[in-house]
Image (spheres, helix red, strand yellow):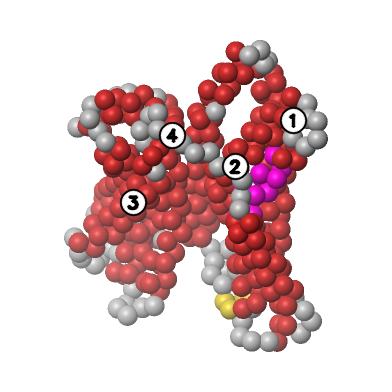
Amino acid sequence: MFYLRLARGYRVLDLGRWLLTAVAGAVVAAFLLRALGRAMSDPPGGADTVARLLWCLPPLAAVAWFAAVAARAVPAQRPERITGLTAAGAGSARIRALIAGEVALACALGAVLTLLLFLVLRNDIAGPSLAADLGMGVELPAAAPVTLLALVPLTAGISAAGAVPLAETLPGSPRPVRTGFGPLRIALPVGLAVIGLALELIALRPGAAADGRPIHLPAGLGTTSTAALGGWTAGALGLALLTGPLLSWAGRLLALGRPTPLRLLAGRGLTAQARRLGPPLAVLTLTLALVLTTVRYWIGTPDSADALPAMEACLVLGCTAAAVAARLAELRSARRDVADALLRLGASPRLLAGAVALRTLAVGTVLLVTGGLTAALAAAGLR
């Protein structure tokens, strides 16, 4: 009843976030139920059952990531809601649990709708093409779908609860602003990128194809070597961790020397937002680079595409893009007071819009570099 009363005050942004969470939970539930139906249709003891469940982990992780970013943005986007709950006597931990429960409820609703559709299709409605995916002709254990689908709201709720810091749930709480990156935070990704590049060069040397045992990649991506796979993993992780520092350095570069007001606003704003904007952009860039590399390999190798990885890639891309949008909305809400103060001091709206455009250009340049290197490392290791 509390969440129904809360939904009466939803705005378009809140409804969009809630519906996106429910749709993502429904799609992950469909993947889990398909794995269950296939397991019931296949002979006992098949090794494909575990592989199908493992294929459900990437979309489940993507939904958890989106739930965490969206839950973290709620206190900044709706401070009046947090103020009202505080006035009603809700403490910091209570507010954190309420935000996580809202996310889990959306995922649970999507999972329940998918389960109802699954049961309806099993009632001799689906055609022969879906019989194996639904496990038709085999009795459905009641505990199996409930146990599998409980993973969706449980994972999303735990991720949302862990993403909202206790200090940020109450209005007026001090929020320490950290804009720099320590030496270890920079040395680790640089070291990983160098190690990944060295392993890739070892894997690409003449005669390297005859060394070792090839690794068969999923999703019809052919084979690769241990050095190439390890090099891409280390390089991609290093480039992803380096996204935040590169954004900060790009902001400092914009404000270098004697900058104009446009460059100063764009550079200082990007430097201040780099720590919070880097992680979602790094995940989106890594996912997009991997998807583009996979599509390129499928185009160059006919009859190698697989429908299941393609659908999961669409879900993962959608969740990461929605996470980036939620983080941008959070940052915009956090900088609203700064923008209002600048307007009161006489800054023109055109100047603020130009600073946003310049920041966007700098961010796009950094992501183009990191994403291009990640895709190049991945394409070099496939054969």
On the question of residue 31 being in view, the answer is yes
Q: Nearer the viewer, residue 6 or 136?
A: 6
The three-letter code of the residue at mark 4 reads Pro
The disc placed on residue 158 is 3
Name the quarter where the N terminus is drawn.
top left
> Which circle, 3 or 4, is nearer the viewer?
4
Dot 1: few (<14), some (14–19), or many (≥20) neighbours within 10 Å? many
Q: Which element carries disc 4, helix, strand or loop?
A: loop
Could you tell me the amino acid type at mark 1? Arg
- Which span is picked out in magenta? 240-251
Q: Secondary structure at mark 2?
A: loop
Q: At x 53% / y 22%, what residue is drawn?
A: 337
Marks 1 and 4: in contact by CB < 8 Å?
no
Residue 241, how many percent across, how many down?
60, 56
Which numbered circle lies on residue 263? 1
> Which quarter shows the C terminus?
bottom right
Query: Do callouts 2 and 1 mark residues in contact (Cβ within 8 Å)?
Result: no
The residue that appears at 49% across and 39% down in the rendered structure is: 176
Q: Indicate which disc residue 174 carries.
A: 4
Whether residue 207 sits left or right of residue 299 in the image: it is right
Q: Main secondary structure of the magenta part?
A: helix
Image location of residue 289, percent across then percent down: 64, 55
Pointer 2 residue:
179
Residue 127 in the image, given as x and y percentages of width and height: 35, 57
